[in-house]
Amino acid sequence: MNAIIAMQNFRVVKSISAICCVLGALALLLPAQTPFEARLLDILRAKGVCTEAEVNALRAEAAAAAAARGDGETLAAQVESLTAQLQEAAPVTGYKAGGGFHFSTADSKARMMVGGRVQVRFTSSSPEVGADRYNFSTPRVRLWLEGHMFSPEWRYRIQPELAGPQVTITGAGTSAANFASLLDAWIEWKPSGAFSLRFGQWEVHYSRQQLIGYANQEFVDRWSNLGTFARGYQTGIGAAGGFGGEKGEMVRWSASALNGTGANVANADETIMGLARVSIDPLGPVGNLEGDFAGGDLRIQAGLNAWTMGNAGTDNTNCVGADLTLLWQGLYFTAEAHRRDNPTGSLLQRGFFAQAGYFFVPGVADVGLRYGNLEDYNSGGPVRVTESVATLGWYPARHDLKLQLDGGLVRSWAASGAVSDEFRLRFQVQMAF
């Protein structure tokens, strides 16, 4: 019944549009603008009811009538005026799954896309010492708005985080927490694929897994110790580009000057973080997502990253890292290694992880394994942490709609030599809109 009603409504709307266009044609055949014609032009301008095909038919109809009457110049001018007004007034709208709703002017000088993602998670933790814990959470609830203004060269993106930190129960009350924060907020000038200049705040280009983002992971989340090396969201200025290949995707590079203090935190001194990344895709483009959904021929990406916080002060450190990724016939493999030290060259932390996933149902279901190792030479916490995790994923709509289950062992070594184990199981549902 709803389908029948919808079809009837569609026919009614189409009929109204056709009637309006016919009336427009009749109005254009008038030798001068009457109050009726002026009113009709206002309605057509405001509603944009005529399609491009209808406008072309209207032009041909008016031209034929004008030729028969001998006043073609006057009528042609009216047709061109009305056509320009209709095209200017009619926006282009649409929706793409995972890519959000988009709105664009007819001349493409302005475009806006709106979307978001939600993650819902259950975590079961069984530490060797202490009680088991079961927890439901929404680790990430994000909306985003992006597009361009004035011309496609001037791009922007705004993304707030609505989930915020979890509130911890403390006896009779709860701890304070801020539930909204700003993540992406940048303006970019991109005159070509070979060069762009960005101003604002974004997740910086260090580590392929961080660059991919939380939303496109093959496991429930990234390697748990990646944050020791990757600097997350920062504010500053950066340049990026690419060259080689059909679309300039073979070699990609980026370089940034940043506060180095995290998201929405001002710089307290004169120290600025310098950061750079370069990657090469010699056998074809490797997208910023985990998993070989396409199941095609071999593709490889190799990347190098580095950042520095200067050479003075106790808080200033340097970090270097490398990553390697391979995709082939449904198999996805990626590995990263990182080293962080202070200005004197003393080692602070080093670590690596490697993971592999395989789509046993092409593009729909996969399994995977990950092993990570962190060695800490700097703090009084664990001197070593390893992570051994297996995953099972179902992707009805790739990363835009997915259900993931992973579980494994996190083992920690204290400075005293004591070892503690924690078994962890996580189940997560993610939807993009």
Image (cartoon, rainbow, N blue to C red):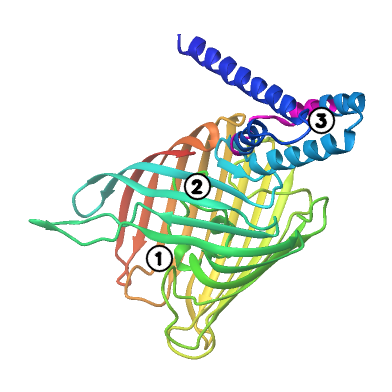
Q: Nearer the viewer, residue 105 or 40?
A: 40
Where is residue 182 shown, x and y percent of the image? 42, 61
Verify whether residue 56 appears in magenta: yes
Q: Which mark is residue 401?
A: none
Q: Which residue is mark 3?
A: 59
Label total for image? 3
Q: Earlier in the sequence, mark 2 or mark 1?
A: 2
Closer-to-camera residue (14/270) = 14
Amino acid type, mark 1: Arg
Dot 3: within a 10 Å radius of its alpha carbon, few (fewer than 14), some, or many (20 or more) residues? many
| Residue on which disc 2 sits | 215
Q: Give the residues drawn in magenta, as a range.
A: 46-60
Query: If you read the primary sequence from the N terminus, does the residue marked by circle 3 or circle 2 appear first?
Result: 3
Residue at left offset 27%, top offset 54%: 166
Find residue 135 and report its horizontal and vertical position in percent: 26, 45
Rendered view: 41 above or below 88: above
Mark 1 is surrounded, within 10 Å at the Cα level, by few (under 14), some (14 to 19) or many (20 or more) other residues, namely many
Name which residue type carries label 3.
Arg
263 on left or right of 96? left
Residue 84 at what x, y percent from top left?
Answer: 74, 42
Q: Amino acid at mark 2?
A: Ala
Q: Is residue 55 left or right of residue 114?
A: right
SS label for mark 1:
strand
Label 2 to label 1, Cα distance in Å? 28 Å
User: Rounded to the nearest whole Å, what is the CA distance between mark 3 and mark 2?
Assistant: 49 Å
